[in-house]
Image (cartoon, rainbow, N blue to C red):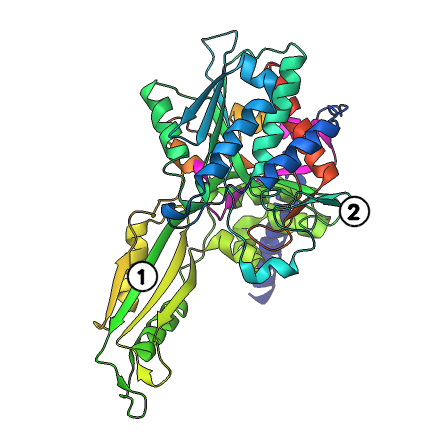
Amino acid sequence: MLKKLLLITGLILIAFLAVVVFRTIGFKSNQITVEQITPAEAGEQSILNFQTAIRIKTISHEHHSRMDTAAFGSNLRFMRSAYPNVNKVLTGEVVNQYSLLYTWKGRNPALKPVILMGHMDVVPVEKESESRWKAAPFSGDIRQDTIWGRGTVDDKLTVIAIMEAVEKLVAEGFQPEQTIYLAFGHDEEISGKQGAGKIAQLLNSRGVKAEFLMDEGGLIMDKILSDRPVALIGTAEKGYLTVDLEVTTHGGHSSMPAPETAIDILSKAIIKIRDNPFEGRFTAPTIGLTEYLGPEMPLHLKMIFANRWLTKSLIQKEYEKTPGGYAQFHTTIAPTILTAGFKENVLPTVARGTINFRILPGETANSVMKQIRRIVTDQRVKLIPRKATSGEPSRVSSTKAPGFQVISKTIRQLNPDIAVSPFLLTGATDSKHYADISADIYRYVPSRLIGFHDINERIAVSDYKNSIAFYHQLIKNLNTPN
């Protein structure tokens, strides 16, 4: 009996190992094989134009009343004067005063158009942080072959690189087969409703249905694979929900505090929410990431990724060790604002807190609110969702569709060493306004970026030039059958 049991166990083990080995051997690369090409060159004027754009303080403040309309007007004049070829051949429209929509008519009206997006506004710079910048935040200075300033990363890079590429293509006599729209919003940093939202409404009213759309998002990273860079293309983005918590009490003198003050009650509610994280799980973009990057890894890691049926929890646990990895698997919970009190010896009557949630595909704003209400049972805590700024997770765009394929092809033509992969974008972009215009929306910036919303935002001159070359080749590839 024991021999028989050992034999059965051995056979099961052999079968198990055979499945693991078979799946590892069959775990083939998803990378497109193309010949490397010589990138288009960007001249000194392209750099000067980028510097000029950075110096224009198109800052989006939380309150529209603080908008510097003169700066946004100056930006429109710059976009007209710096790109004479674009403004001569393409049809340009100013949308809702400060956003731009360019239409580049294609030769074949039967083909669905493509939309290339970006936004022209930037976040403010905290006055307290200005002394920590190595170059003035709106200087556009070049130091050590690096361009410094707000917008070098988010997101004037995209706008200017696209404009430089199209300016060059028009000068070369190029005309696209399909119509190409260039859509540049002016308020992405404060929801995009007045910029991209209005452009999308305009295109919808004209019945535009795009083959694909490309906005800011993923980027080139050097530390995901040990031996080569990775280009991450966002095939979906998380939803967005902000919830305000409010506690009202009688207040009083600080020398005679009640057992629980407004601050105590609020703090306990926030901690309770943080102590009950949302369940982690794989989504289509993270599964795609394992399928695209797994085959490029060393054998022992390739085996782990090839056998996700067995190693799913191990992969997830490893990724969750970093904030970025954790965000790929969870709806995240981020307390961002706390306000209470006005005098040191007075107990506040009101305490308020704000929590921002980034919602995983498959969940909704409603399901997030249900969980919060289940956790926070203290009736003294009011939960107030900000419906005006909330948004559901996007659809997941296909990696088999023409858009993903042509973006991948372009990346690898310019640098065959780069591995391309889908992933889940944890932030929000203007592309959310275009859900009715295209089923396939991709989020990618063809560069290495430093300083998102941070001090010392900057980009290497070489990366800026490479971004222009990317859009130049991407548009040319649209005319070439895959």
Dot 1 corresponds to which residue? 244
How many numbered tags mark residues here?
Answer: 2
Dot 2 corresponds to which residue? 144
SS under mark 1: strand
Type of residue at label 1?
A: Asp
Q: Residues within 10 Å of mark 1 (few under 14, many from 20)?
A: some
Place residue 461 in its image quadrant: top right
Q: Position of residue 399 (x, y in %)?
A: 53, 32
SS under mark 2: loop
User: Quick check: can you spot residue 232?
Assistant: no
Q: Residues within 10 Å of mark 2 (few under 14, many from 20)?
A: few
Q: Nearer the viewer, residue 36 or 243?
A: 243
Q: Nearer the viewer, residue 404 or 145?
A: 145
| Residue at the farthest front position | 70
- In primary-sequence order, the first of circles 1 and 2 is 2
On screen, residue 404 above or below 91: below
Residue 363 magenta: no
On screen, residue 187 above or below 45: below
Q: Which residues are magenta?
A: 408-430
Q: Nearer the viewer, residue 101 or 470?
A: 101
Q: Are marks 1 and 2 in contact (CB under 8 Å)?
A: no
Residue 429 magenta: yes
Measuring 32% from the left and 56% from the top, which residue is drawn there?
368
Disc sitting over residue 8 in the figure: none
Residue at mark 1 to residue at mark 2: CA–CA distance:
44 Å
Q: Is residue 248 left or right of residue 323?
A: left
